[in-house]
Amino acid sequence: MKVLGIDIGGSAFKGAPVDTKTGRLLAERHRVEIESPCALATGVAAVREIVRHFDWQGPVGIGFPAIIRDGKIGAVGNLGQVWEQQNGVTLFRRATKGPVKIINDADAAGLAEMKFGVGRGRQDTVLLLTFGTGIGSALFHHGQLFPNAELGHIPWRGKPMERYASAAVRKRAHLEWREWAVRVNVYLGVVERLLSPELIIIGGGVSKKSEKWFSYLKANAKIMPAHLHNDAGIVGAALAGE
Ligand code: BGC
């Protein structure tokens, strides 16, 4: 099946048509930059632009950086509070010509990696973490997703841990890769103590640059970059849109 997958993040909306049988992108992805906090109209317009770019008429799957239940947006991390309690399906349906389904962005990336990437066939506990504007998490056991595991929001020194160890913090605080990896290790230590995953898959844009920082990481679990790198979010959103 062909589904337009859209991955919404704190700094850009990215989309591409996806073949959900193979997990392949059917065209180069299209990116629309936004700033957080992002107004509702700006977000809807960004989705509209992606739909227009591909002249897309079919189903659309959207990965959104918040708790998502039955299409409804719950607590939001970085995109802004105006999104909270909105019905994401109704909202984005204004911008598409086909049906819309919506899922948490990290859950989407996790689904893609479990189906087409390094999590394929795994029955043990697998945790996918995406490092971007925030930290997203998707937790699997026996291949089943535990939805909306917001592990970037574990409190650390009075703030969510994503404000201490996300990829955006590395840039904002001008940290060397090694310095940032020390923070990521603190984070990994906390999540490992809580969940004991056998495999931790690292996604987000920084997964493409694993040679710069993976050698500094320390964990009991096996750590691997997402096979689909930053496309995992788009592919998983498309899977959710089937
Ligand atoms: C949000 C999560 C999201 C993560 C990555 C966090 O701020 O609360 O829902 O998965 O950022 O985008």
Image (spheres, helix red, strand yellow):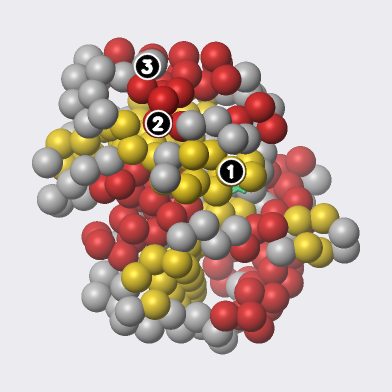
Ranked by sequence position, the earlier of labels 2 and 3 is 2
Q: Nearer the viewer, residue 95 or 219?
A: 95
Q: What quarter of the picture does the C terminus occupy?
A: top left
Q: Residue 35: name its quadrant.
A: top right
Q: Position of residue 110 (x, y in %)?
A: 39, 59
Q: Is residue 15 above or below residue 112?
A: above
Q: Residue at x 68, y 31 (%)?
A: 80
Q: Could you say whether the residue bearing mark 3 is in a helix, strand or loop? A: loop
On the question of residue 3 being in view, the answer is yes
Ranked by sequence position, the earlier of labels 1 and 3 is 1
Q: Nearer the viewer, residue 218 or 61?
A: 61
Q: Residue at x 47, y 19 (%)?
A: 44
Q: Residue at x 40, y 53 (%)?
A: 109
Residue receiving disc 3: 95
On the question of residue 165 being in view, the answer is no
Ranked by sequence position, the earlier of labels 2 and 1 is 1
Judged by depth in the image, the label closer to the viewer, 1 or 3, is 1
- Amino acid type of the residue tagged 1 in the rendering: Gly
Q: Position of residue 8 (x, y in %)?
A: 48, 35
Q: Position of residue 32 (x, y in %)?
A: 47, 22
Q: CA distance from mark 1 to mark 3?
A: 21 Å
Residue receiving disc 1: 74
Q: CA distance from mark 2 to mark 3?
A: 10 Å
Q: Is residue 155 left or right of residue 126?
A: right
Residue receiving disc 2: 89
Give the crowd class for mark 2: few <14, some 14-19, many >=20 residues within 10 Å.
Answer: some
Q: Is residue 161 above or below residue 63?
A: below
Q: Nearer the viewer, residue 123 or 166?
A: 123
